[in-house]
Image (tube, grey):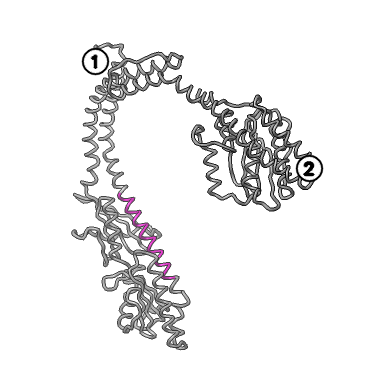
């Protein structure tokens, strides 16, 4: 390999490439720097909006859960079992009371399982001083317990109530302004403070901020994602729009930015505190990286252009010239090299490819044609003795009963069959001749099997009769039907042959109503029909037919197997219309 040398040439492609890169990249870098400083405020606003969007998302999630839990409490407070239990107690037996309490306990469990924010569901029955809880079960209570809980209803000026440092959603029936008057029942859902705090921490980690959830006008109940820092809570500002359900407040301090969402219906507020260092950090990092990128990109452009020319462009040009000569039929070329990298491997493989090209073509295509001819002769020699034995045995049986007319008919069919099978000089026949031979074989088999087998053969269209195909294609498929599909049928055996034209393909369908075809056998036959390698393994019968068709017409044609609508096997013979085909020798040309 010649040592790399570089001389300045203004007309060189490398010089032009480097100059073009510089002309494009340097103005872009300068423009990027100016845009960075110009858009710093916009980027900061986008970071603020991104954190605000996450807060909106958590608010929507929390507001949705509160609405859903409120709806559940309202729905179950109107449930017949819960609503009428207290009024039915005087006419109920002890067993009915216990059974109703257990049923109520089950319904409360259903409420608790609907949301991870529910830690407990309680149901008070002042009439019998009973309390049903999903965590404590059923127990007796005093009047002070339900009265103290009922007295907190609405103390947060919203849907929720605060009782013993816990959040409750309460419903009573009937609603009494005097908490000392016992209601029929009191239904309460206790929210999970731990779950609310966990969700706040999850959102604060993803948003890079501290989030505080406060309930009540005076922030009577507060949950914060940062338990180590006392949250700053701003007073609620009155909204100018009385119909507004959610108001937004923003406060900027020296070191942080606060964003609040206040829900007027449920009387709670979400506040996110974002540090200024978090807001400005992306802009600072981006500015530093942009300056570094501007310097490094110029150096990389120059070095990469030189390296590309030396390590890739020049050796690739040599390989391309070799392929162009090979495309022109010059198989005697040889690339001399001393490289040990990937291009050295490509050069070596290129030389070996051209060296063995003709040998591979001869071994692949010529051998496939000879294999197909040998398989045809093997099939003929395999079928003839077996079929001859069965035919002679059938003639012997007809002679024993002195059925002379049937012997004459059978012998005539048998003569036509063997005359067709022994015509070795005719490797190809018309489709009409092949169908006539298949019908002769079918007639012989129908005589052998008698009335327990019948056949339905459709008429072939005239324009399909002169299609040239290899000999002995349909008879092995029909033989397979009798041997594996209809041989065990004691009566009502049916073989059906029909034709179907689609685009440039003629499909001959041969199907039966046999009942011995399993799914495993069908899948095995389908895999054998789709097998591409025709030179391995023993190939007989319908597999031989499939391979001969693919050798003759190409891989799009051949046999397909599926389950027939009659219940047995359906073999589809696909051949090209009007004798158009691709020999195997032209598959890769």
Q: Which residue is mark 2?
A: 406
The percent coordinates of residue 473 (x first, y second) are 63, 34
Snapshot quadrant of residue 145: bottom left
Q: Nearer the viewer, residue 19 or 242?
A: 19
The percent coordinates of residue 329 (x first, y second) are 46, 14
Q: Which mark is residue 4?
A: 1
Q: Nearer the viewer, residue 555 or 300?
A: 555
Q: What main secondary structure does the magenta stretch of the protein show?
A: helix
Residue 581 seen in the current view:
yes
Spot the residue most to the front.
Answer: 400
Q: Nearer the viewer, residue 312 or 134?
A: 312
The alpha-carbon separation of the residues under discs 2 and 1 comes to 94 Å
The percent coordinates of residue 205 (x first, y second) are 26, 52
From the viewer's perspective, tell me whether residue 365 is left or right of residue 405. left
Magenta highlight on residue 233? no
Residue 240 seen in the current view:
no
Q: Earlier in the sequence, mark 2 or mark 1?
A: 1
Q: Is residue 25 above or below residue 213?
A: above
Find the magenta span and give its range: 51-74
């Amino acid at each position: 390999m010649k040592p790399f040398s570089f001389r300045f040439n203004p007309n060189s492609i490398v010089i032009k490439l480097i100059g073009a890169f510089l002309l494009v990249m340097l103005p872009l870098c300068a423009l990027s720097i100016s845009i960075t400083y110009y858009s710093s405020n916009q980027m900061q606003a986008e970071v603020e909006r991104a954190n605000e969007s996450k807060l909106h998302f958590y608010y929507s999630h929390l507001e949705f859960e509160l609405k859903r839990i409120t709806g559940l409490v309202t729905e179950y407070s109107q449930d017949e079992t819960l609503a009428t239990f207290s009024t039915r107690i005087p006419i109920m037996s002890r067993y009915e009371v216990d059974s109703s309490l257990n049923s109520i306990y089950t319904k409360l469990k259903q409420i608790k399982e609907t949301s991870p924010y529910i830690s407990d569901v309680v149901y008070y029955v002042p009439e019998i001083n009973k309390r049903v809880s999903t965590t404590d079960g059923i127990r007796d209570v005093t009047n002070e317990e339900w009265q103290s809980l009922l007295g907190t209803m609405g103390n947060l000026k919203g849907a929720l109530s605060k009782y013993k440092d816990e959040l409750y959603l309460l419903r009573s029936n009937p609603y009494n302004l005097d908490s000392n008057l016992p209601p029929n029942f009191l239904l309460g859902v206790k929210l999970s403070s731990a779950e609310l705090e966990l969700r706040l921490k999850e959102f604060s980690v993803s948003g890079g901020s501290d989030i505080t959830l406060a309930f009540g006008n005076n922030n009577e109940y507060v949950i914060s994602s940062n338990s180590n820092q006392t949250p700053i809570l701003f007073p609620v500002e009155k909204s100018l729009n009385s119909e507004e359900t959610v108001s937004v407040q923003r406060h900027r301090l020296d070191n942080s930015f606060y964003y609040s969402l206040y829900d007027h219906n449920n009387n709670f507020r979400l506040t996110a505190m974002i540090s200024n260092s978090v807001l400005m950090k992306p802009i600072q990092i981006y500015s530093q990286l942009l300056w570094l990128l501007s310097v490094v990109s110029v150096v990389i452009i120059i070095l990469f252009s030189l390296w590309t020319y030396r390590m890739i462009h020049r050796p690739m040009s040599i390989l391309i010239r070799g392929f162009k000569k090979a495309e022109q039929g010059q198989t005697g070329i040889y690339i001399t090299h001393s490289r040990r990298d990937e291009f050295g491997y490509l050069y070596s493989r290129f030389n070996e490819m051209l060296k063995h090209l003709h040998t591979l073509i001869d071994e692949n295509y010529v051998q496939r044609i000879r294999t197909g001819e040998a398989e045809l002769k093997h099939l003929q020699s395999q079928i003839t003795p077996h079929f001859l034995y069965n035919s002679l045995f059938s003639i012997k049986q007809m002679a024993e009963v002195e059925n002379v007319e049937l012997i004459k008919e059978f012998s005539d069919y048998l003569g036509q069959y063997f005359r067709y099978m022994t015509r070795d000089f005719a490797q190809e026949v018309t489709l009409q001749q092949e169908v006539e031979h298949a019908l002769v074989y079918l007639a012989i088999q129908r005589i052998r099997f008698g009335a327990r087998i019948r056949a339905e053969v459709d008429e072939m269209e005239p324009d399909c009769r002169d299609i040239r195909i290899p000999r002995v294609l349909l008879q092995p498929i029909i033989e397979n039907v009798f041997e594996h599909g209809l041989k065990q049928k004691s009566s009502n055996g049916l073989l059906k042959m029909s034709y179907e034209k689609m685009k440039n393909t003629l499909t001959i369908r041969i199907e039966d109503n046999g009942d011995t075809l399993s799914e495993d056998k069908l899948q095995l036959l389908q895999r054998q029909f789709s097998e591409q390698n025709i030179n391995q393994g023993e190939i007989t019968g319908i597999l031989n037919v499939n391979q001969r068709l693919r050798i003759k017409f190409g891989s799009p044609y051949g046999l397909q197997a599926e389950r027939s609508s009659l219940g047995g096997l359906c073999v589809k013979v696909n051949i090209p219309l009007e004798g158009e085909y691709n020999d195997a020798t032209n598959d890769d040309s």
